[in-house]
């Protein structure tokens, strides 16, 4: 599949994206497309938000069109990516679906018999598309990383609350994904970070990406040894770098293949990008998603759909501002990286990530005229 990746910084540097595309490729891409409006928007934007830096990555037809780092950010900068973790987590689960170890349409009670009643009827598909009906525990500030994922799932089975019957509404949440993580550990006999490393991080060349902690927690420091983090939040505790996540998107854009190795089947990629929520009411999500009445796939939002419901653009933005996206019609993927403070602004009078996406699209489209 043709694809575009986008990155921003103060100086161009070689990048291991798109089959070894380099700074020379980026320079040729910039010669064909005028990214000055994007650069100006980024520069003014991160300053207006009071951030130490920001970065943005574009690759098209195996060529890096743009990679720049603003302020203190460099190719080595690693930040917590919050809900951008969901896309990575869905990919891990789909590798197990590909192998027949997990059935998307099986009830959770098939794998975890202690889930009974209405909770036992939730399917894996519903639990990774926010349609399970399960409500999150109000516990982010005190998320316990010392317990196992299986122990967390057992707590959900005993104490979890259902806001609605499975498959009747969309409620953006984290607990149901965490329970599926317990299933993944059970059917493989391996801890989550090991599964992620061997199934996604190593084949996709993501050495700086792992699951460590959730926003706001004081139970585990950012750099706590992974062995001590037995219950990483699948929906929001990963850390990554611009290039690492770009490598992941390259795999998605290339139909599941990275560095000549098949990571996911093309069927799995299509399933992740498929509208899983359809006509169901969106009951809980961020204000911008509620306003847009966005639909959801598996681990990723559907930003744009055509009039027939076909998926055009997907993304998985995080609460701290990290935002990866893939536009299927433009063969374009991009990663915008920033880390706002908890409670700090993500938009300003001079910056909005949705406008940044529009500027990227406009720049790429203008270069093709």
Image (spheres, rainbow, N blue to C red):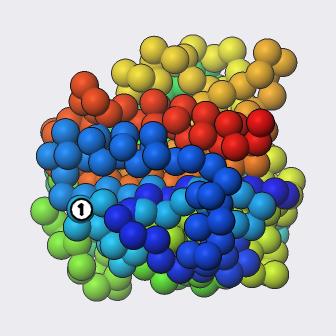
Is residue 53 visible in this depiction of the protein? Answer: yes
**Residue at horizontal 41 percent and vertical 36 percent from the top:** 353
Front residue of this view, candidates 229 and 263: 263
Q: Quadrant of the C terminus?
A: top right
Give neighbour class at mark 1: few <14, some 14-19, many 20+ (Cα, 10 Å).
Answer: some
Front residue of this view, candidates 259 and 103: 259
Q: In this figure, which residue is indicated by the disc labeled 1?
A: 71
**Residue at horizontal 61 percent and vertical 34 percent from the top:** 362
Where residue 122 appears, x then y in whole percent? 62, 38
Please determine whether, in this image, residue 207 is positioned above or below residue 1: below
Front residue of this view, candidates 289 and 312: 312
Where residue 183 appears, x then y in whole percent? 59, 62
Left or right placement of residue 34 versus residue 305 in this view: left
Left or right placement of residue 326 versus residue 62 in this view: left
**Residue at horizontal 67 percent and vertical 53 percent from the top:** 32
Where residue 258 appears, x then y in whole percent? 74, 75
Is residue 230 visible in this depiction of the protein? Answer: no
Left or right placement of residue 172 versus residue 219 in this view: right
Residue furthest to the front in view is: 31
- Element on which disc 1 rests: strand
């Amino acid at each position: 599949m043709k694809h575009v990746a986008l990155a921003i910084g103060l100086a161009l540097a070689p990048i291991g994206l798109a089959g070894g595309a380099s700074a020379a490729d980026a320079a040729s891409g910039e010669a064909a497309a005028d990214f000055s409006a994007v650069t100006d928007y980024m520069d003014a934007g991160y300053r207006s938000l009071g951030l130490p830096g920001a970065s943005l990555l574009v690759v098209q037809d195996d060529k890096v069109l743009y990679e720049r780092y603003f302020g203190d950010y460099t190719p080595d900068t690693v930040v917590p990516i919050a809900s951008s973790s969901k896309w990575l987590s869905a990919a891990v689960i789909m590798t197990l679906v590909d192998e027949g170890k997990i059935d998307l349409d099986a009830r959770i009670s098939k794998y975890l018999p202690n889930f009974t009643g209405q909770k036992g009827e939730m399917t894996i598909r519903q639990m990774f598309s926010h349609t399970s009906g399960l409500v999150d525990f109000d516990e982010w500030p005190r998320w316990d990383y010392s317990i196992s994922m299986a122990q967390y799932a057992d707590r959900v089975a005993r104490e979890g609350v259902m806001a609605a019957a499975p498959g009747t509404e969309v409620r953006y949440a984290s607990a149901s994904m965490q329970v599926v993580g317990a299933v993944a550990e059970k059917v493989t006999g391996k801890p989550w970070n090991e599964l992620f490393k061997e199934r996604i991080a190593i084949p996709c060349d993501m050495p700086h990406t792992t699951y460590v902690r959730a926003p706001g927690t004081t139970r585990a420091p950012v750099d706590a040894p992974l062995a001590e983090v037995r219950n990483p939040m699948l929906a929001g505790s990963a850390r990554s770098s611009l290039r690492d996540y770009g490598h992941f998107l390259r795999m998605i854009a290339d139909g599941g293949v990275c560095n000549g190795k098949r990571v996911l089947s093309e069927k799995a990629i299509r399933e992740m990008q498929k509208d899983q929520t359809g006509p169901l009411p969106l009951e809980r999500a961020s204000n911008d998603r509620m306003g847009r009445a966005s639909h959801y796939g598996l681990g990723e939002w559907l930003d744009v759909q055509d009039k027939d419901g076909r998926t055009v653009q997907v993304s998985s933005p995080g609460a701290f501002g990290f935002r990866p996206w893939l536009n299927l019609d433009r063969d374009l993927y991009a990663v915008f990286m920033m880390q706002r403070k908890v409670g700090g602004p993500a938009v300003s009078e001079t910056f909005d990530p949705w406008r940044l996406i529009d500027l990227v699209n406009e720049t790429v489209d203008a270069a093709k005229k």
